[in-house]
Image (cartoon, grey):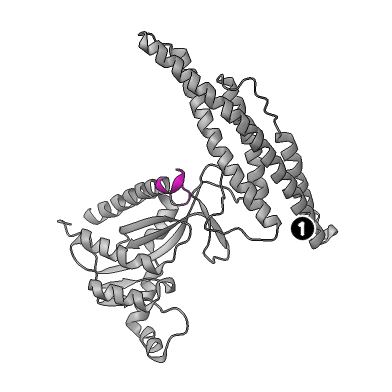
Amino acid sequence: MQAKLLRTDRLRVDTTVVPANVSSPTDSSLLGKAVRRIAATGKRIQAAGGAVGTRLRDRSRAAGKRAHAIASKLRSRVALGRDEAKAAVLSCTGELAELADTAAREAQRLLVNAKRAVRRAKAKAAELAARGEHDAAAGRRRGRLVRAVNDLAKLLDATRQIVAQTRLRIAGHTPDGATRRVSLHDGDARPIAKGCLGKPVEFGYKAQVVDNGDGIVLDHTVEQGNPPDAPQLAPAVKRVTTRAGRTPGTVTADRGYGEAAVDRELADLGVKNVVIPRKGKPSQARRAQEHRPAFRRTIKWRTGSEGRITLKRGYGWDRIRIDTTEGARIWTGRGVLAHNLVKISALAA
């Protein structure tokens, strides 16, 4: 600020999807992974000394057969006919859901017994500590057991949710995107439809980026799901004003922000020029305003959105490597910091 490198006279705002660390999820792929991970986590628990007498059947091979059957039906849908192939896929998916549900119920019994083993291990450690003794090997084994038990508890919750949404889809209903589970390890990632031709639906988090003419990101937020754009704009401009100590003269954004209420909120904050195309069919006066040369020049400048493009290309916004919404905010924040340091260094040189 003291070097006068940070300009806030013009701001451009855009939203983008920051993909979570998941591959394109389908119900069948998630169910297959759940069955395999339940078996693997159960083995970890028993290897650490928990619930060794509880039987947990490994259904990974059966899940793999159902998954291969689904892939086979999809490949042969031309020969079978689309309706027949769809019915066959739904049938195989239903069998996979039953398999995952059975595996989860069995694993729940193992989890209950493993928790008892954890309590016994902790009680034994407390007794040793009271006598002034310490068993390092038992402590390491107890740590492995606790981690495996916690992992299994989270995995079973995720599996039940995926089984429920699969059954809902088989029944002919579309699961609500705001609550749909798309990952076993990242429970906050959501499907987000942005209308792009290449990727009509992406899986992750929605981020808003505010940058200036030099491409320096002045504000960014990351939210779960697909919240509406318009209510996010005025708070972002207010945060920029607070940090910079002055109100931006021009704010521009795409049509997703185009509401009269947004224009009023920005005017109340002291923004002189609000350049946002209005949603829906504009009135004749509004159409004339949007066709003014100054309005159109600012709109063309906005489409560059250098901050958003650069962040995705070179600063980690192409894929989030930390799970949960809070993890996504940490990951994107470090990308913004690195990006801004490079930009400011170039301006100061």
| Figure check: 229 above or below 26 | below
Q: Residue furthest right?
A: 79
Q: Is residue 319 magenta?
A: yes
Q: Nearer the viewer, residue 347 or 333?
A: 333
Residue 86 shown left or right of residue 8 in the figure: right
Residue at x 37%, y 8% (from the top left corner): 131
Residue 293 lies left or right of residue 140; in this view the side is left
Residue type, label 1: Lys
Please give left or right for residue 204 compared with residue 55 in the image: left
For the magenta stretch, what is the residue range?
Answer: 318-326
Pinpoint residue 167: horizontal percent, then vertical percent: 68, 52
Asked whether 332 or 86 is in front, the reply is: 86
CA neighbours of label 1 inside 10 A, class few (<14), some (14 to 19), many (20+): some
| Residue 322, placed above or below residue 197 | above
Q: Residue at x 75, y 45 (%)?
A: 95
Q: How many marks?
A: 1
Residue 326 x, y percent position in the rendering:
40, 47
The residue at 18%/57% (across/down) is 1
Q: Residue furthest left?
A: 2
Residue 106 image-quadrant placement: top right
Horizontal and vertical percent position of residue 283: 42, 89
Counting from the top left corner in percent of width and height, residue 143 is at 47, 23
Q: Nearer the viewer, residue 181 or 339?
A: 181
Which residue carries the number 1 mark? 86
- Tell me which residue sits at (29%, 73%) in the image: 266
Q: SS for tag 1? A: helix
**Above or below, comparing residue 101 to residue 73 in the picture:** above
SS assignment for the magenta stretch, majority: loop
Seen in the picture, residue 259 relative to 187 is either above or below; the reply is: below
